[in-house]
Image (spheres, rainbow, N blue to C red):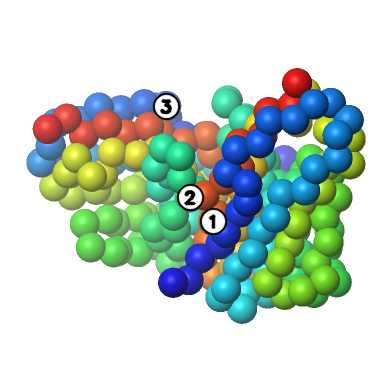
């Protein structure tokens, strides 16, 4: 089944404890992206990647890191999480960055205390 | 800066009725517009993608229209069913690519059996 898989689905952590949210797609998509969704603010892009070893900042990159060492994987790293990073996170991918629809994972709900 | 608005934020409709969801954007220089649905606890599912050169796209009971000059798009759902209950989001892209999508905050649709 074609899908974007995020892990974990739920995560509760404490301020300053490094964490990684994994994202993997099995559709051989070139383009991948991370979003956060907050009430009243909608989805905002954190980082995106056009292809392997090519990443760029979105609208809200502060406090996050990403890497794209393999085509299928695009992990999101929070080196020192803070409470304002409590949010619902989505990974998405598409065939290319052009006129192709985005496929989303089921989300990771992160709580930082 | 592009702004995408979806009004109303919530809508309840009796089963079987036809309905229209609205999406407006401030900058008419878009490349494409996508409609998504989001179910509780799930990621977004792409419904329709309209290129800027198109006026509408259809998929089953769904029809999306685009009027670039007025900065508006509508999603028409025919013969609504309880399974259509979800949050519907639109997103616009300023150029060839998904990397700069701007999302609306969505309309939460409830179909009353």
Q: Nearer the viewer, mark 1 or mark 3?
A: 1
Whole-number angstrom distance, CA of label 3 to CA of label 2: 17 Å
Q: Nearer the viewer, mark 3 or mark 2?
A: 2
Task: Say if mark 2 contacts mark 1, CB within 8 Å.
Answer: yes
Secondary structure found at label 1: strand
In this rendering, would A64 be left or right of B102? right
Tag 3, which chain? Answer: B
- Residue underneath mark 2: B44
Residue behind mark 1: A104
Q: Are marks 2 and 1 on the same chain?
A: no
* Residue B54 visible, this angle: yes
From the viewer's perspective, is residue A12 above or below residue A26? Answer: above
The crowd level at tag 3 (other Cα within 10 Å; few <14, some 14-19, many 20+) is some
Q: For the view shown, which residue lies furthest in the bottom direction?
A: A28
Q: Are marks 3 and 2 in contact (CB under 8 Å)?
A: no
Q: Position of residue A5 (x, y in %)?
A: 57, 59
Question: What residue is shown at x 21% (from left), y 34% (from top)?
Answer: B111
Instruction: Same chain for labels 1 and 3? Say yes or no.
Output: no
Q: Position of residue A54 (x, y in %)?
A: 84, 69
Question: To which residue does mark 3 refer?
Answer: B9
Residue B19 lies left or right of residue B41; in this view the side is left
């Amino acid at each position: 089944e074609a899908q974007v898989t995020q892990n974990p689905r739920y995560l509760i952590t404490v301020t300053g404890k490094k964490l990684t949210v994994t994202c993997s797609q099995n559709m051989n998509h070139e383009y991948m992206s991370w979003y956060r969704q907050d009430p009243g603010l909608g989805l905002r892009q954190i980082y995106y990647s056009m292809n392997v070893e090519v990443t760029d900042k979105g609208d809200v990159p502060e406090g996050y890191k990403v890497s794209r060492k393999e085509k299928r994987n695009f992990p999101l790293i929070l080196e020192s999480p803070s409470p304002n990073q409590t949010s619902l996170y989505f990974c998405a991918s598409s065939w290319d960055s052009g006129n192709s629809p985005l496929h989303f994972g089921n989300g990771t709900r992160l709580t930082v205390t | 800066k592009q702004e995408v608005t979806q009004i109303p934020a919530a809508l309840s409709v009796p089963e079987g009725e036809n309905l229209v969801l609205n999406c407006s954007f401030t900058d008419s220089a878009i490349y494409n517009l996508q409609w998504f649905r989001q179910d509780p606890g799930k990621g977004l599912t792409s419904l329709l993608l309209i290129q800027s050169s198109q006026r509408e796209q259809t998929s089953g009971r769904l029809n999306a229209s685009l009027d670039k000059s007025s900065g508006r798009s509508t999603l028409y759902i025919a013969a609504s069913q309880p399974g259509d209950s979800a949050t519907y989001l639109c997103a616009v892209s300023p150029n060839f690519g998904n990397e700069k999508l701007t999302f609306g905050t969505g309309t939460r649709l409830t179909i009353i059996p």
